[in-house]
Amino acid sequence: MEGCGEALELDPGLLLLRAPDWGRIPYAHSLLALGRRSVLVDTGLGPPAIKRLRRRVKLALVLNSHYHRDHNWGNYLFKDAPVRAHRLDAPMINSMSAYFRAMGIAGRRDEALIRRFTLGFIPHIRGPRVGTFEGGEVFDTGELELEVVHLPGHSPGHCGFLHRASRTLFSADVVPDSFGPWYGHACSSMEDFAATIDKVISLSPRALVPSHGRPVRRGVERALREYKSRIAWREERLLGALGRPRTLGEIINEHPFYGRRRAPLGLPYSFWEETMVRKHLERLVAEGRVVKVGRRFVSRPQIS
């Protein structure tokens, strides 16, 4: 597998193909399951690596973990192999209009800017029409089996792929790092993401293999619990910022989740952070922990 992206053997016949810079976006790792009907999960390695892989391995099937383009921008290189994704995310891969609707940018003042950035950040070349799969389906290569595990939250149809024999889970964008959990599109759900992390913990994977960064082989449960705790941490950060009334714009300018160190990057962080702040505010208002007074939000203990 030399030249296809560094191949890390997870188990005999099961390989992680490492993307450039350990999968820093716009790249993402791929999972390769070898056998008589070899299967590739995700195509975000970059076109040169995908082309080299195609010369070395005959693939029977390509699976996309979800609709985000860093995971499927190489789909166009598979005109002769079926490509499939979860039923809930396939429409966003098949249509850029559906993609932008899922992002939640329609009607925004910066809609055109976000569209241009998105299409410029990762080149868009239309690929073959993507078919669908469901959670629980098992793909048999003739040598090993991969089971689809529906892990929504990051996106509605986000999925991981479990090799039960070795208890290895390719967790896609369930990435236990300081950046996530990420729920920065309109169709994302932090509540679903929290439940997904609990689901991954319940699977007791021996190895957790995300699409970005390094595999986690020790302290998997601890890493996942710390990862989940960031949702509550963000909520407390937001409540702390609302000790006095603030508008949405004032809150976002404080960069409560990602901090000012990333603020100069502008898009996409500003859009993602705004979306995530809005989701937290909606929940806090619904729970009565925050109230909206005119255009400003304030934590309830501050209301006389």
Image (tube, rainbow, N blue to C red):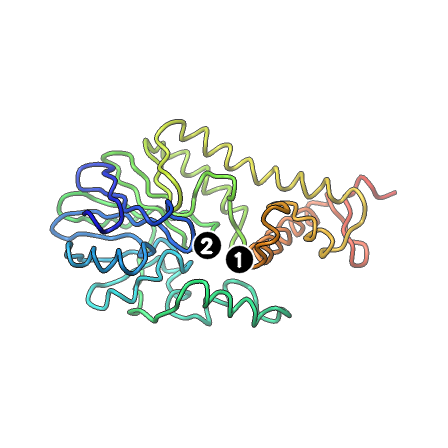
Of the image marks 1 and 2, the number of the one nearer the N terminus: 2
Please state which amino acid type lies under the numbered disc 2: Ser
**Of the numbered discs in the image, which one, if any, rests on residue 155?**
2
Q: Is residue 185 above or below residue 171?
A: below
Q: Secondary structure at mark 1?
A: loop
Residue 149 location, x and y as percent? 35, 46
Few, some or many residues within 10 Å of mark 2 (<14, 14–19, 20+): many
Residue 20 location, x and y as percent? 35, 49
Q: CA distance from mark 1 to mark 2?
A: 8 Å
Residue 137 location, x and y as percent? 28, 50
Q: Which residue is mark 1?
A: 185
Tell me which residue sits at (25%, 53%) in the image: 40
- Is 185 placed left or right of 245 in the picture? left
Q: Secondary structure at mark 2?
A: loop
Residue 142 location, x and y as percent? 13, 47
Question: Which residue is the extreme one toward the right?
Answer: 304
Image quarter for residue 43? bottom left
